[in-house]
């Protein structure tokens, strides 16, 4: 009887040990999934051509090309950002990405100063892949700084905020940052992402830097997200040279000190850049790295999981 009890206890201990080992194996962290929150699609070979890119004879970059470039970099999903001022290209993109589940949605292009803005907004927002719009100084006709006091802009932005979509402000300038703050003060319910903010660098002039820093700190209080989506290149960097961690660290530190781990978002598919930024954020904490590479992009853009390889909260 005693031997039977010992055998039973031994068996239970073995099973518990095996179960614990299995639990550890399941819990072991794997590679951090990456969401590329900013890429463009275009096809200059279309009969109507393409206003972007500006490089002559550029080859098309379509959903299949995104997949091909994303997988080797460890990118599991992406958000397409519109680079065309043609309103009909919003539909062209939505039709193309419908069949590519690696693309979780798009930031479209609608001009909030146009009389037909709300008509197009009501039309496109019904598509679950339409995540918001891009506005700022993307094209010569887009000048949010000059338009910030125009009543039609504010009224249309209030209607836009009511949809729950995201406004991406592009491209970074000191005056555009100030205009963004003024816009949010007029439309407090806006969800805003600042695009490519690291590209501006840190203003050299002390007075400009002080005001710029204060504006960013106010935007952080208003829960604005920021794309730290590349590496700032110093003026002494050689064209075509490999990214140098020393080039990006001052700007990365500058944005980190203001926005912290909850409001910075990644974009890109360059493996060298990814490794440099992975090291930077892992040094902060594994949780900070996860937030930067994918978790923060979910509340920022409200994208939906379309592919089994994509993470979810």
Image (cartoon, rainbow, N blue to C red):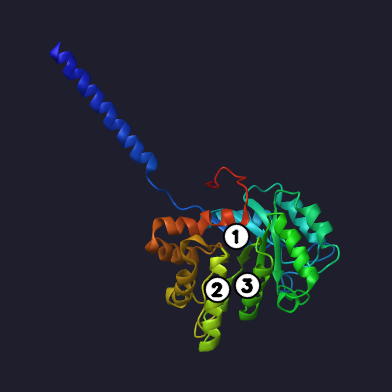
Q: Spatial distance from mark 3 to mark 2, Cα to Cα?
A: 8 Å
What residue would you read off at disc 2?
216
Quadrant of the snapshot with the N terminus = top left
Residue labelled with disc 1: 37
Q: Is residue 255 left or right of residue 18?
A: right
SS at circle 3 = helix
Above or below: residue 45 compared with residue 306: below
Q: Secondary structure at mark 1?
A: strand
Circle 3 sits on which residue?
Answer: 181
Q: Which mark is residue 312?
A: none
Label 3 Cα neighbours within 10 Å, binned few <14 / some 14-19 / many ≥20: some
In the rendered image, the vertical position of residue 69 relative to residue 236, given as above or below: above
Please tell me which residue is depicted at 75% across the width and 68% down the height of the picture: 154
Can the viewer see residue 193?
Answer: yes
Outermost residue, left side: 2
Q: How far apart, in angstroms, are the residues tagged by discs 3 and 1?
A: 22 Å
Q: Which residue does the image show at 65% across and 64% down from the upper left?
A: 188
Camera-side residue: 4 or 51? Answer: 4
For this orientation, the residue located farthest to the top is 1
Of labels 1 and 2, the one closer to you: 2
Q: Where is residue 70? Give x, y as percent.
A: 57, 56
Provide the secondary structure element on which disc 2 rests.
Answer: helix
Q: Position of residue 290 (x, y in %)?
A: 46, 55
Residue 239 left/right relative to 89:
left
Left or right: where 11 falls relative to 289:
left
Q: Residue 107, located in which quarter of the rendered image?
A: bottom right
């Amino acid at each position: 009887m005693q031997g039977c009890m010992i055998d039973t206890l031994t068996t239970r201990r073995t099973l518990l040990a095996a179960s614990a080992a299995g639990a550890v194996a399941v819990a072991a962290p794997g590679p951090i999934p990456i969401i590329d929150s900013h890429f463009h699609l275009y096809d200059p070979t279309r009969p109507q051509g393409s206003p972007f890119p500006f490089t002559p004879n550029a080859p098309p970059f379509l959903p299949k090309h995104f997949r091909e470039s994303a997988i080797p970099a460890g990118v599991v999903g992406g958000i397409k950002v519109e680079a065309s001022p043609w309103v009909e290209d919003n539909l062209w993109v939505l039709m193309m990405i419908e069949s590519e589940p690696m693309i979780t949605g798009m930031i479209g292009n609608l001009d909030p100063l146009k009389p037909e803005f709300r008509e197009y907004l009501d039309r496109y927002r019904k598509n679950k892949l339409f995540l918001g719009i891009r506005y700022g100084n993307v094209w010569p006709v887009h000048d949010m700084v000059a338009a910030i006091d125009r009543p039609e802009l504010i009224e249309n932005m209030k209607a836009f905020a009511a949809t729950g979509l995201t406004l991406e402000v592009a491209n970074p300038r000191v005056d555009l940052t100030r205009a963004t703050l003024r816009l949010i003060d007029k439309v407090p319910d806006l969800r805003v992402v600042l695009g490519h903010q690291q590209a501006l660098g840190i203003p050299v002039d002390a007075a400009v830097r002080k005001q710029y820093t204060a504006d960013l700190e106010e935007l952080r209080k208003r829960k604005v997200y920021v794309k730290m989506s590349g590496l700032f290149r110093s003026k002494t960097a050689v064209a075509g040279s490999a990214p140098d961690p020393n080039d990006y660290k001052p700007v990365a530190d500058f944005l980190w000190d203001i926005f912290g781990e909850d409001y910075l978002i990644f974009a890109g598919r360059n493996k060298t850049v990814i490794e440099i930024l992975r090291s930077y954020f892992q040094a902060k904490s594994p949780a900070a790295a996860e937030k930067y590479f994918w978790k923060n992009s979910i509340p920022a853009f409200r994208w939906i999981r379309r592919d089994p390889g994509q993470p979810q909260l």
